[in-house]
Image (cartoon, grey):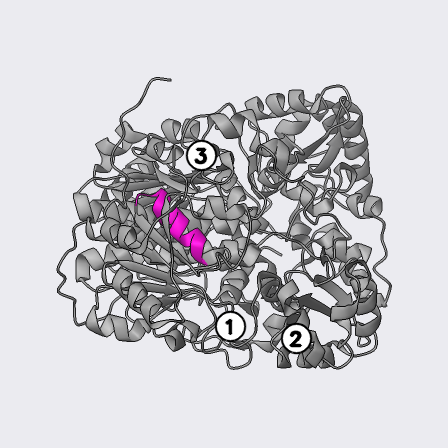
Amino acid sequence: MIATQCAPLPLFGVKVVDLGQYIAGPAVAMILADLGATVVHVDPPSGPLWDSPANATLNRNKLIVSIDLKTDTGLLQAQTLISEADIVIENFRPGVLRRLGVDFAALREVRPDLITVSIPGFASNDELRREWRAFEAVIEASSGVFADMGLSRVLMGLNPSFSPLPLASAYGTMLAVSAVVLALQARERTGSGDQIEVPLASAVMEGLAYNSIAINNLPLRYKSAREREIERRSEAGLPMDLSYGSSQQLLSPFSRNYKCKDGRWFYLFCSTSHKRHARRCLQVLGLYNNLVAEGLADEEDIYLPIRDWQSSVSLASLPNAWVNKIADRMTTIFMTRTAKEWERIFGKAGIPGAPQRWLQEWISDDHAECGGLMIEVDDPVYGPMTQPGPVVWLQESGEAMLNPAGRKWVSFDQAVAALSALPSRSWRPAKSSAGWLDGVRILDLCNVIAGPHSAFYLARFGAEIIKIDPVTPLYDPLCTVIYGLTHMRGKRSALIDIASSGGREIFAKLVKSVDVVIWNATDRQVKRMGLNLDGLKSLNADAIFCQLDSFGGVRHGPRSDYLGYENTIQATTGIMLRSGGDPETTEEYAHVGTLDVMGGFAAALGVAVALYQKAKTGRTGRARTSLSALSGLLQIPFCYDYAGRAPFDEPSGLNAKGYGALIRLYETASDRSLLLNALESDLPRFAGVEGLRDLANVPKEERSAFLEAAFRRGSAEEWFRRLSAVDIGAAICESVAATRSANSRPGDDVPGLRQGSYSFSTFRNHPSGHIVTQVDPCAIRTTHGTICTLPPAEKYGASTREILRQLRYAEADIDALLSMGAIGESWSKEYLPS
C-alpha cells in the first residue's frame, strides 16, 4: 500500500482524563482519542469493573493507570492528573465521585477552563431514581426500550423483550462526546470550560424521539398496517397472538425480506415514502409495466388530502389485495438470483436493499474492511483484533485514524509525563454565559431523520438553522411532516428548486452566508450538486461541510455509493438478525430511528470537531460519518474478533430474556415484568431479600427456575422495593407511552432540564392544528453554556419569503421566482395532509 500524507488529527494536544467504567464513559474518551486527544484512563487496582474483550476497543489509543481513589494517595494522584487535563470524564452515580474527593464544581472554581462531563444512569436532579443501581438494562427497562422494541413483537405478545444492545450507552456516548467538543470549541472563543451532565435515561429517551411522540387525532394514512392492527386488537380486547409469518404479511412489499436463490434473505427497503424508489424497484424487477396495465397508478400529488386522490390503487397507498399480489410476484423473482447478486443490482440502480448478515459476517465483510469501517488493532492481551473503525472523521485526516495504537498500561509517573509533555494554555474566561454555538449559521440540506436531526440537535446551543427542501417534495408527508415535528423544531424552512437557474442562485447565496453546510448524501450526489471540495471552495472556502451517508467510511469501499436507510444498515451489520435471532425471523430493532438519531448526534460531533479545528488552527475541515460507522458502537459489547474469540452466542432472538438467571426479565404476580440485573458478587445481598434469601445456596443451573417461581409470588412493585433496599439492580418494565404520560407538562419556554431524567412537553396550540406531545431535548445539562428552548416546527416553506428578503431579494423578485416555480411557500394547504 502506498502511504498517504494527511493532516494532523483535529484534537491533537487536547488532554483527557478518563475515570469512566463500563461503556459510555470509556467510549466518549475512545472517540476523543481516535480524533487525536491524549487520554489517560484510570482503572481501580482490581481492574475494570466490566471484564470484557470490548475494553480493548474502548481503551485503544489510551494510557491506562491503576489508581485507588478510596485512598489518600490515590486521590492525590487523580487530582494531579486532572490538574493537567482539559477534559475529565466520569460515569458513576450522581455524587459518588464527589464523595471520593473529586468535586467537579470545586475544580472549576479554581480552573474555569476545565471541561467536565458526568454520564450517570439517571439525572442528579431525579429524586426518585438517581440512587438506583443504573446498569444498562435497568435504564432500558425503566425507559420503555424493552417494551417497545418492535411492532411485530407487540403483535406476537412478546412484550417486553430483552436485547443486549446497549442503546442507552450508545446514545449517551454520542450526546456526551458531541457536547464535550462543542464546549471545547466554545472555549476557544470564550476561555471558559463547562460542567456537563448527560444522564443515560435522558439520552435514550431523546434517541427514541420518533417513537415517543404522540399526535392527537393523527390521520389514519400515517399509521402502518401493523400499528392499525395493534390498535384494533387493543380496542377490541383481543389478544396479541399473531404468528411471526402473519405479522410479516402486514408489511409493505417494498419493506420486507425475500428469500433468494442461494437460500439467503434479502432485505428490501425502498419505501413508498420516496417518490421514485418503489417504482424503480418494480422496473428493475420487470414488474412495473404489467402492474400499471392491471390498474396500478402513481398519485401525482400525495400532499392532497387522501379523499382527493385520483386512484385507490397507488404505490403510496396499496389495498391489501395489491400488497399481496405485488409481494407474491416479487417473492418469485427474488428466487431467481442470489442475495449477493441482488445487492449489486439494487446498489447500482440506486435502490436501498441488502442481504441479511450476521455481525460475524459484517466484521469480516469486504466493504467493511476496504472502507475502514472495521480496522485491525494490535492489542497487548488479545493480539491482532478486528475492531469497529472511527465513528466520525475529518476527510483530510481520517486516514490517520485507521491505525490506532493498542491500549497501554503505564505507571502513574508515566501518565503524568504524557499529559505534561503537551503544552498548556492560559485562559481568560468570559464573564457572561452564552450558547456554545451563538452566531453560527447552518444550512441544512438533509432529509428523512439522521441529517435533519443533527441540525436540530445543534439548534439548542444557539445555532441559527436554515432548512431548505425542494419545491416539489421527494418524500411523502410521513418522512417530512411527521418526522419533521421533531427535527424541524428551531429551524426556518424554505422551499427552493436548486436545479433551476433562479433557485441555484439563491442556493449559492445561502452557502456564501453560512458557516456550516450539512447534507446526508453519497460522494456521487455531493459531486453532482457541486458541493465537493473544489465546488464548495468556489462558493464559500471558509464553510465547514458535514456529510453523512449509509455505507461510507474513511476510505471508499465497494458499496460506499449505495443508497440506504436505517433498516438497510441494520440488515447489513447484523442488528436485524440479532434482534430476530434467525434468518427466518429477522426483526428491526427499536422501530424508528435507532441508528438514524445516533447518526444525527455523530454528524453534530463532526461539525463540532471541524469548528474546533478551525478555531484552533484556521484549517477548514470536511466532517464525515455514516450509519454503518455507528453500527459498531451500538454493538460494541460483542463487535470484535481475534484468534481464539469465544463463539458469537450473546443473547438474541424474539424470545430472549437476558444473560442467564441474574440478568433477566421475569414475570410477576401483578402481570408487570421485572428486570433483575445482579452480579455474582451480589449473591450475599440476596440474604437480605425476603423470599430470595436462599438464592446463594441454589445451584447455578437451577437459579432461573427458583427466581421464576419466587417472582410470581409477588407484585413487580413489591419485588422492586425489596431488591432496591439492598442495592440490587432492578427495574419495572415500563412502556414508552407510560413514561411519556407520567412525565408530560404543558409546553413552555423552559427546556425541561429541571424535570429529572424524563421530560415531555404537550403543545396544545401546535402550528399543525393537532395536540402534540414530544420529548424535551434535555439530555445535555450545563452549568455555563446556555441551552435554548426550541419552538415547535413551522410548516414547510413558512420562512421562504423571509429568508429571501434577508438575502436582499425585492418583493417583486420573490413573486417572480414563485411564479416560475423556483421557490415555494408550501407543499399543501394543510400543515399535516389529512
Observer able to see residue 406: yes
Q: Residues within 10 Å of mark 1 (few under 14, many from 20)?
A: many
Q: Residue under circle 2?
A: 685
- In the picture, measured across the screen, residue 422 lies left or right of residue 658, that is left
In this view, 245 is above or below 790: above
Disc 1 marks a residue whose amino acid type is: Ser
Quarter of the C terminus within the rendering: bottom right
N-term-proximal mark, 3 vs 1: 3
Circle 1 — which element?
Answer: loop
Disc 3 marks a residue whose amino acid type is: Asp
Circle 3 — which element?
Answer: strand
Q: Residue at x 59, y 37 (%)?
A: 573
Distance between the alpha carbons at the discs numbered 2 and 3: 40 Å
The front one of 326 and 500 is 326
Q: Residue under circle 1?
A: 759
- In the picture, measured across the screen, residue 318 lies left or right of residue 575, that is right
N-term-proximal mark, 2 vs 3: 3
Residue 485 pos. (x, y %): 51, 59
Mark linked to residue 784: none
- In the picture, measured across the screen, residue 251 lies left or right of residue 532, that is right
- In the picture, measured across the screen, residue 298 lies left or right of residue 208, that is right
Q: Magenta part mainly helix, strand or loop?
A: helix
Circle 2 — which element?
Answer: helix
Q: Residue at x 57, y 25 (%)?
A: 347
Q: Residue at x 43, y 78 (%)?
A: 754
Mark linked to residue 378: 3
Q: Nearer the viewer, mark 3 or mark 1?
A: 3
Q: Which residues are magenta?
A: 25-36
Disc 2 marks a residue whose amino acid type is: Arg
Decide: marks 1, 2 in contact (CB < 8 A)? Answer: no
The front one of 380 and 625 is 380
